[in-house]
Amino acid sequence: MTDKTVNRDDAAANEAQIAVLWQEESYFKPSQSFIDQANMKDPDIRKRFGEENFPECYREYADMLTWFKPYDQVLDTSNPPFWKWFTGGKINACYNCVDRHLDKYRNKAAFIFVSEVEDEPPVAMTYQELYVRVNEMAALLRDYCGLKAGDRVTLHLPMTLDLPITMLACARLGIIHSQVFGGFSGKSAGQRIQDSGSRYLITCDAYWRSGHLIDHKEKADVAVQEAHDLGQEVDKVLVWQRYPGKYSAATPMVEGRDVFVNDLLKQYRGQRVAPEQMDAEAPLFLMYSSGTTGKPKGCQHRTGGYLAYVTGTSKWVQDIHPEDTYWCMADIGWITGHSYIVYGPLALAATSVVYEGVPTYPDMNRPWRIADQLGVNIFHTSPTAVRALRRVGPEEPIKGPQHFKHMTTVGEPIEPSAWRWYYEQIGKGQAVICDTWWQTENGGFLCSTLPALDKMKPGSAGPALPGVYPVIYDEDGNELPAGSNKAGNMCIRNPWPGIIQTIWGDDKRFVKTYFERYCKNPDSKDWRDWPYMSGDGAMEAKDGYFRILGRIDDVINVSGHRLGTKEIESACLTVPDVAEAAVVAVNDEIKGKVPEVYVSLAAGSKASSDAIVKAVNQACEDMIGKIAKPSRVHVVPDMPKTRSGKIMRRVLAAISNGRDVGDVTTLANASVVEDIRKQVQG
């Protein structure tokens, strides 16, 4: 079905038409068997969380937790936009994720660790074992490091169980943890150490990635030096060993500064540390944005509101039960991993899988073997990973034995073609899909279908979650109604418990970045005057489902017409041989900007480059209009990607515009950058 018929041949189509690429799709209904077992199947839930019941409705989320002292007030709006949630309450995140489950789930697996080395068997850690390990680590942090509530600690750890153990130990003491994604450089870690004022860096010697045991310790030396150059001294570097009792890095330990965590822990064996009773507003962690330019933003998340929000959304959107084995294929170094590998699932006593390596090693079917071996029934990944897995061949995964009841996508919009492949091949037409939209600053999901209540629609994130009231504004602050077929800036009219408190050490930047643009009255204490600006473009269909079009920054203005890069990429991906597409803006003297396209092909494709270029151009014309025809199409062997699988479009944009590509050493496949540069520039 479609909301509107667009004249595909009209090169002068207006902006509203250009904003619409993904035509409205048919609906997919959840199965009755899923509905019968779902956590949330009350059709009145959105009414209960309606604006007339805000903010009291969020008691339902807070009451999923255990409080040492009950909260007095759900929401304090006295100092907008610095909202305070569940004020007066005392709580501990570690206690809620570990201790309170011991009576009933002591011998149930909290985590299952899967090494990238397939010959190494999975390791299950029960809630009792996790409790012991976290307490011992907390004792080390308190007694050896002298750390206390409110101190900051920077973690630079890969995907092993050492990471959640360390995070939970910090949370137990009220120490603010700042985990830097393991794939980031030592320099990036050093910048974050300086900004947070950390005196301790917790890292590891090595980890497996794409079949290689990577020397991770070498980054610690760079990080400490970078922090020093910026004015922050690091007292100690605590090093976890990938294989306890064995040092697996070539980089030597620095005498007097570096110590092995595994050795130190022997001094604290059997120790127990009472969880600190933290104020609900006490910061739990910092999560730094991964922007390629400018100073990183330290998103500061509170304890009570954040934990309540990720617990509620894990239960209602991801449908996590204690009996489930749940695998989020993200990295804990990102907000998705914090919220939906560690804190949300553990608060619900789930079993959460932690996988060390890349999903495509040693082959594309590794995820399905893991899922079958562990009995995973909830699977959570990104559209980037879906497209990468699809490259092996369109029918391959259906041969696998995996059986999921629920699958989630996160991180970016997913094209209808990729959605259907995910649904039909990975989920075998049985699993529900939640295409979620949210951001680092949001703590948890903001838009998604509730899987037992809402029908699924490819290409649409779905309606807002209960208690979230979005609005789409145009450039002049006018509200764009549902079904208008116009795209604008996606905003949220109200606070919610998962929203960040501020940007660490920079309240002014917090206000300017997220609230200044559409604030109706800077002197008002009414939350209705302080809509949150997400920075994403979106449009709302007649049915109230939101279609996210990507970052506002990713809009290319061609001769006065705004083209979303995600829209053009989606058109490219309708070409059967195209597995991945990336669109960048290139300067043009006449049109201002023009789109340039990079595509990589599916495994086994025998199509010629000329045929692909012709097909991609035709798809863009057919699905959007001649105005969207790329200036050039490059068929490349692979895309430059981060180690988490994200395509680095800034590198491609630099190549297309003849600029320096910058530091690409942290990419998973840095060598491909020079190959692409030669192909494009000659």
Image (cartoon, helix red, strand yellow):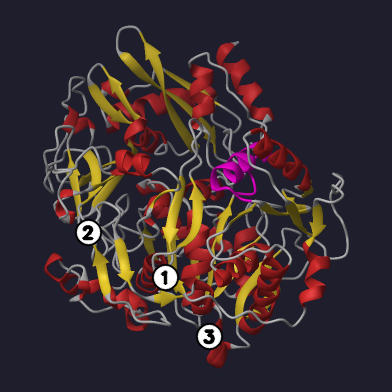
Given the image, on which type of amino acid does mark 2 rest? Ser
Query: Which circle's residue, 2 or 1, is located before the other in the chain?
Result: 2
Whether residue 647 sits left or right of residue 127 in the image: it is left
Along the line of sight, the residue nearer the viewer: 533 or 2 = 533
- Residue 251 screen position, x and y as percent: 85, 44
Residue bearing mark 3: 101
Residue 320 in magenta stretch: no
Given the image, on which type of amino acid does mark 3 rest? His
At mark 3, the secondary structure is helix
Query: Which circle's residue, 3 or 2, is located before the other in the chain?
Result: 2
The label shown at residue 78 is 2
Q: Is residue 584 above or below residue 158?
A: above
The label shown at residue 419 is none
Magenta-drawn segment: 181-198
The label shown at residue 279 is 1
Residue 197 in magenta stretch: yes
Q: Residue at x 71, y 52 (%)?
A: 362
At mark 1, the secondary structure is strand
